[in-house]
Every structure is written in C-alpha cells, then in structure tokens.
Image (cartoon, rainbow, N blue to C red):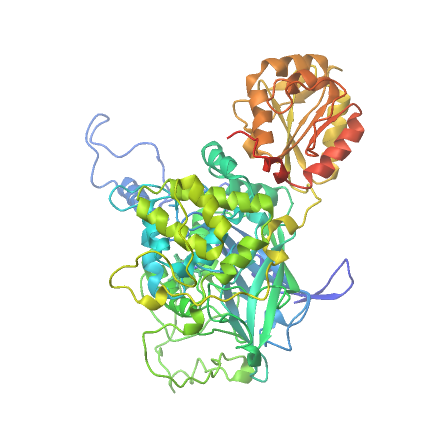
C-alpha cells in the first residue's frame, strides 16, 4: 500500500490502485467479443426479428427480440425530484493540513493519502433534459470513498437555503417547479407560484439575494464555490466536539456569465456546463478546489448575532476565517453517464466517525429524505451495491435480500447476536473505529416551534446586497425585475417589493420602478402586506438586527481570483488571407498561457493565410456564437478583413461579445470590421476606444496579444455596463 512519491520523495500512502480506480472491475470494455443475450446465448442475427415468412408476423417465441425490447422498455428510472439535471466526474481529495485536533475522521487527519471522490454538479428545478444555464442554485455533491466508509458532502454553490425547516421543502419545490396545470415554465423560477410562495416566506430573503445574483448563472462548474450549508460537528479522539462549516474554493476563481448570455447559451448549447467539465478533464486541465473549514468551539455557540443552527445564515469569513486544509481534483470523466452520474446516490446521513450532525431543522429533515428518495428512484434497498455507491472498505452486516440484490451471502446466520456464525459480524468498539453518535444533551418539551433566534430574516440579506460591487448590484436588480416581471399577479409583485424594502430601500425602489410600482413606507420589523389568514404571525414578524459587520469582501465575486486564462476558450475570427504570422504567434501565446483558440470563419474546412498556409477551421459563423467563448481576437490580413466586413454574423459576434462585457482585441488593419460594430462606429485609425480597457486595438501584434491575454484574465469588464449604454 505504501509507495514512494516520485516528485517529493515523501512517503505517500495510496489507497491501492484498485480502490482509486473504483469501478475497474465493473467496467465492460468490448474487445473482439461476440454478441450474446443476457443469458449468454450467442446472437447470430441482431437485425431481423423472427417471422413466419419474410413478410409474415413476428413470432412470440423470439426470445432474442423480446429480451432486447423488454430491457429497452425499462431503461428509464424516475429522475431526481430535484437536481435532476447534472454532470459528474471522478477525482481525488488530498489533505494537506491535519484536523486531528478537532476530528478523528481518518481522511481529515492523514496527510498525503489520495481519497477517491465522485462529484456531481446539478441545477435544482429543471428536468433531466433542461438547460445547464437556467437561473438556479447549483448542487455540489461530493462522495468521499474513505477507508472508514463513504462520507457525502451534499452541498450547493450558495451557502444558505430558502427555508429553515424541512417541513417546508415540498412546498418550496412545488412552488418552483413548472406549474402543475400546464407544466410551464421549464427550469425557471420566473413565474407566479414561485414568487407567491417566496413573497409569503420572509425567511427566504437572504437566499433570494444569492439566487438573483450572478452566482445563479456560473460560467462553469469549475468556477463555482461549494458549501456544506449546515453547521456540522467534528468529534475528536477524546469525544470533544467543535462546530464546522465546510467550503470549496475553486482555484480558477468564481465567475459568471451575463443573464442575457445565459439565455442565449440555453438555446445555442444547453449542455454548456456539462461539455465544459467534460472537455476540461479530457484536455488534462483538471479542475481543482481548496477544501476549507470554519471551526467554532462549542462554548461559542451563542456568541453570534444569528443562530448557528439556522441554515439561512452564513458565518461571515471576517468573523471566523476559512482555513484551507486540502484539495479536490477532478481528473477522470465517467465511462457511462447512467451507471455513474445518474445512479450515484448521495445522502447527508453518510458520515464517518469524527463527523456528526447538529439540530439544524433543515438538516434533520434531509437525514430522512435522501434514503427515502433513493428507494423509489433506484428501485429498492440495495442501491448501495451499485458500483458507484459502494464504499471502498468491505461491508458486513445482517441485511439480506430485496430487489436487485448483488451480494451472495453464504451460511445460515443473518442475525445478531449469534453463536452459530461465531458471533460474526462483530460490533466495532470505538477503538476499532465504531461510529458512536455525539452524546448531545437534550432536555426539552416536544413542540412544533421554531426558535425565536431564527427570526431575523433580513440582516444577512442586507449584508449580502451591501457587499456587492455596483455591476453586481445592477445585475441583481435586473434579475428581480426580470423574474417579477414574468409574474402576472400584481399582488405578488407588491408583496415582493415589501420584502425587498425590509432588506434595502434603494433596492426595493429600483425594482419597483421596473415593475411600475411605488414603494410603501417602511415600518420597522413589520411587513406591510397582508399575510394568509391562517398564518402563524411569528413567521412574519422579523426581529431586525443590524449586523455589526456591514460588508463582507468574500461575498462579492469582484474580489475573486483573476489573472489567468487557463482553460478559457478564445474565439479568433478569420477568413482566407488572414495574417498567418500574427495568427500563429497569437495561438502559441494563448496555448502557453493555458487557454485554447477556436478559429471561426465564414465556412468550415480550411482557410489559407496570406502566406499560403492552410489553417483548419473549427467552427463556421453559423455553428459558433459569441456567447460560447470567453474573449474574441480579430487578426489582420487585407483579404480576411474584406471578407469579415461582408460577414454580418462576424459583426454580430463582436457586438454581442461587447454587450456581454468580454475582452475584444483587433489588429489595427481590421478597423473596417470594427467600424461596422455599434461600439466602435466612427472610430478612425489612431483612435483609441475611450474608457474601456477590455477593447484593444493595436498595431504591434505581439504587444497586442500580451495585452489581450492580460485583459482576458480579468474575465469580464462589467463596468462597461455602468453608463447603461449597452443595448439590450
Ligand atoms: Fe437536497 N435533495 N434536500 N438539498 N440535494 C435531493 O435527493 C432535500 C437541500 C442537494 O447530485 C434529493 O437523491 C430536502 C439543501 C443536492 O444526486 C432529495 C431538503 C442542500 C442534491 C433531497 C433539501 C441540498 C440534492 C433529490 C430540505 C444544500 C443532488 C434526489 C430539508 C446543502 C445530489 C436525491 C445529486 C438532492 C431532499 C435541501 C443539496 C429529494 C428534504 C439545503 C446537491 O432527497
């Protein structure tokens, strides 16, 4: 098991190749094999069913046809009720700072051990075939196959949730899903039932800020943060507990697309995120995240202005810093989407010794829901035997039988205690790694209540809004105007404006203007709208705190990691006669910086450079669209410039890239092309585009490509939108 780490010379313990390559034994690789039925009978003709005469009826006895058709008829399983649309990948987790002081979990204490993981990213509301780019929360679920059993961190890309008690989850999901009479709209929260519910749930105010922010339209799964959301517990060897919040921090930073762009991508490439993850891994550009923890001693439980058990609250990073303790790398695509990504079954209750739960009422409900959902989705109690769900350690217990049982248990003993089976399997003592629940003391009356400490609904929503940059605030306001604009019931819009007013008056006013509403006067801590007759008034009176923290830098994507174009896709617009020297220098520079270029031309096949070299074309203007790329470069060359000037799709491409605040660089002889765009109309040679460092015009191609790469590393120039002159 122990092997020398070649690079560092350090001893690296690896969980054996067989374990890392989790599914190796179950992967079928067809190699010169003959076709058989599921019973092993070799098939001689897979083209024709058995008939009474070549023009006669098909015969019932055709077991080959019947087996094939029956299997096909049963190929679909129920999709997940939420998070149906997703994509996943295999990888490894490696710890670089031991948490032994806080937990006995081996995977959080043993350094340099490669723990296999499978990660599934998802949207929440849409069906399995819906677009990746819906405005939605993203699931970020990680299964750690540790030596002590599976630990599932079933998180999201947003650190809080809409509701505080699991009892409300079916209502939330019914409200956001397509409306049941006509099943419209697909994968969208912009409709009456969702906002009706939200407008009556002040506790969702904080989550709404996140869901209406650009976090809900990520550029890539690889550029999202992940959060465990709930407060968990870590338990150390001495049985001492600490509270913990889990975080994933993407090495590529947190980046998003524009809402208009997201909607176009949904049509041009609804698999955009799935494809992006797949291609990055195939290209060896393995996505990576740092794993972080916020640790809080038990004695500090009541030190905060909010309740640690309330899943609509964050613990600000300024209050409790995130310690980075390990890395996650995704490095292998699944072999089979269904067998792995579809059949993986996560469960918040899959924990290992050293990790335990808290009384967060949302978490408590999840502890029931996940197994329950797998039973119907995966057809019985043996879903843990599916290769993707099996732990890497061996399992022994007295559970038997059930649909689809794989394991062949031997012997006659399936009970405990027993003497006939020698007492096996034995219960594990704590010294042998047996799981023992944290003995939290509980002395309380049985009540259907929510703690008063859960009643502050707006102060963290305000903290989030105030922490956003100006472009981010504008996007959030636009998103609310869009979503509520799609709501037809005026009373619902009005109620939402009232909720927003509790968060921030300017925010409420800006949204109200877009909806043609006036903002009523604010009355402290009370919503101005009527609540349902049978409502519990306590849900509607919010105890208003002013958080001592006014802004948190960690909440704004403007402060994220920037500066690299690693794995970014650069569109190069070219035609016959393109300047071959500058094109090849550009491509080399971009490759060196970790990005890739896609040549987009008026036709597929190849184009000839001014020096006669044939360059193969990746996409035509018909198959490509500006929204699918991170930045655009237009190399010079007289003939190419002439052709692009005539190509209206090339002009549209540039206009759209500009609208979405992307970096555009053009060599100076391409001026006639730029002059056709709305943003550089009237530009004459020698002019510089005013006040926008994201649009570059240059005479010296090598200098220009350097400036271009540096600018593209900034991702977007959102400030471009601030004068609000960018057309819709
Ligand atoms: Fe889930 N959730 N959830 N959820 N959830 C499911 O489990 C549920 C919640 C999350 O890629 C379901 O296997 C309840 C919070 C992810 O397979 C279901 C409540 C968070 C995934 C379920 C919540 C999540 C799910 C549907 C409120 C972030 C996809 C299919 C009490 C911390 C995992 C399934 C994957 C999936 C129930 C709230 C994350 C029905 C009852 C909060 C990432 O069991």
Give the number of marks. Answer: 0
Along the horizontal axis of the image, is 651 left or right of 702?
A: left
Q: Residue at x 72, y 30 (%)?
A: 587
Q: Answer with the quarter of the image where residue 183 lies.
A: top left
Query: Where does the image place residue 345, in percent across and percent down from the top left?
Result: 43, 59
In the image, residue 28 above or below residue 323? above
Along the horizontal axis of the image, is 566 left or right of 165?
A: right
The answer to whether residue 727 is visible is: yes
Taking the image as four quarters, which one is ligand 1 found in? bottom left
Q: Nearer the viewer, residue 25 or 685?
A: 685
Query: Where does the image place residue 667, in percent across and percent down from the top left?
Result: 73, 23
The answer to whether residue 129 is visible is: no
In the image, residue 509 above or below residue 690? below
Q: Answer with the quarter of the image where residue 644 lies.
A: top right
Quadrant where the N terminus lies? bottom right
Query: Where does the image place residue 243, in percent across and percent down from the top left?
Result: 55, 74
Query: Where does the image place residue 626, in percent across and percent down from the top left?
Result: 57, 30
Q: Which residue occupies the extreme front position in the image?
A: 521
In the image, residue 320 above or below residue 31? below
Q: Residue at x 80, y 29 (%)?
A: 702
């Amino acid at each position: 098991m122990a092997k020398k780490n070649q690079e560092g010379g350090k001893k690296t313990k690896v969980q054996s190749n067989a374990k890392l390559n989790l599914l190796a034994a179950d992967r079928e690789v067809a190699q010169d094999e003959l076709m058989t039925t599921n019973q092993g009978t070799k098939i001689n003709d897979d083209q024709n069913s058995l008939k009474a005469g070549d023009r006669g009826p098909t015969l019932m006895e055709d077991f080959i046809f019947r087996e094939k058709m029956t299997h096909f008829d049963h190929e679909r399983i129920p999709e997940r009720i939420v998070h149906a649309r997703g994509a996943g990948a295999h990888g490894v987790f490696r710890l670089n700072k031991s948490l032994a002081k806080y937990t006995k979990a081996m995977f959080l204490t043993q350094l340099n051990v490669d723990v296999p993981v499978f990660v599934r990213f998802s949207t929440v509301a849409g069906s399995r075939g819906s677009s990746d780019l819906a405005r939605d929360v993203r699931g970020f679920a990680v299964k750690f196959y540790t030596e002590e059993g599976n630990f599932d961190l079933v998180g999201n890309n947003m650190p809080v949730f809409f509701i505080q008690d699991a009892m409300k989850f079916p209502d939330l999901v019914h409200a956001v899903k397509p409306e049941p009479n006509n099943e419209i709209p697909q994968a969208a929260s912009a409709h009456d039932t969702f906002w009706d519910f939200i407008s009556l749930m002040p506790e969702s105010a904080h989550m709404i800020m996140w869901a209406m922010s650009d976090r809900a339209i990520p550029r890539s799964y690889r550029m999202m943060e992940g959060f465990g959301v709930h407060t968990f517990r870590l338990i150390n060897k001495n049985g001492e507990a600490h509270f913990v919040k889990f975080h994933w921090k993407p090495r590529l930073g947190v980046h998003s697309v524009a809402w208009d762009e997201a909607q176009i991508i949904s049509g041009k490439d609804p698999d955009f995120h799935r494809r992006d993850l797949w291609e990055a891994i195939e290209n060896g550009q393995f996505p990576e995240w740092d794993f972080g923890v916020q640790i809080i001693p038990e004695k500090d439980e009541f030190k905060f202005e909010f309740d640690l058990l309330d899943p609509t609250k964050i613990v600000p990073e300024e209050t409790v810093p995130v310690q980075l303790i390990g890395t996650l790398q995704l490095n292998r695509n699944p072999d089979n989407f269904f067998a792995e990504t579809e059949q993986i079954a996560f469960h918040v209750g899959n924990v290992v010794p050293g990790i335990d739960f808290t009384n967060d009422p949302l978490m408590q409900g999840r502890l029931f829901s996940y197994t329950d959902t797998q039973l119907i989705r995966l057809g019985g109690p043996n879903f843990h035997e599916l290769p993707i769900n099996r732990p890497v350690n061996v399992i022994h217990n007295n559970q038997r039988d059930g649909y689809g049982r794989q394991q062949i248990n031997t012997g006659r003993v399936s009970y405990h205690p027993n003497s006939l089976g020698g007492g096996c399997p034995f219960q594990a003592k704590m010294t042998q790694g047996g799981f023992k629940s944290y003995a939290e003391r509980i002395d309380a009356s049985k009540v259907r209540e929510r703690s008063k400490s859960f009643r502050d609904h707006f102060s963290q929503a305000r903290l989030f809004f105030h922490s956003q940059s100006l472009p981010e605030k504008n996007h959030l306001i636009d998103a609310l105007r869009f979503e509520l604009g799609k709501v037809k019931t005026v009373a619902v819009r009005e109620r939402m404006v009232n909720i927003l007013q509790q968060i921030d008056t300017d925010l409420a006013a800006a949204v109200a203007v877009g909806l043609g509403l006036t903002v009523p006067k604010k009355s402290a801590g009370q919503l101005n709208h009527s609540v349902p007759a049978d409502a519990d008034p306590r849900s509607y009176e919010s105890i208003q705190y002013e958080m001592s923290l006014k802004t948190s830098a960690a909440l704004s994507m403007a402060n994220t990691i920037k500066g690299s174009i690693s794995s970014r896709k650069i569109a190069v617009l070219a035609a016959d006669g393109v300047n071959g020297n500058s094109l090849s220098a550009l491509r080399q520079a971009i490759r060196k910086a970790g990005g890739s270029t896609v040549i987009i031309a008026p036709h597929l096949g190849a184009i000839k450079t001014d020096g006669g070299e044939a360059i193969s074309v990746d996409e035509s203007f018909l198959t490509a669209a500006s929204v699918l790329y991170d930045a655009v470069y237009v190399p010079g060359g007289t003939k190419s410039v002439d052709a692009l000037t005539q190509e209206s799709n090339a002009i549209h491409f540039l206009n759209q890239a500009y609208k979405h605040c992307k970096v555009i660089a053009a060599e100076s002889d391409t001026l006639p092309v730029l002059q056709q765009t709305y943003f550089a109309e009237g530009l004459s040679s020698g002019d510089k585009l005013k006040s926008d460092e994201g649009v570059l015009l240059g005479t010296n191609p090598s200098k220009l490509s350097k400036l271009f790469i540096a600018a593209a590393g900034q991702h977007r120039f959102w400030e471009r939108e601030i004068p609000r002159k960018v057309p819709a």
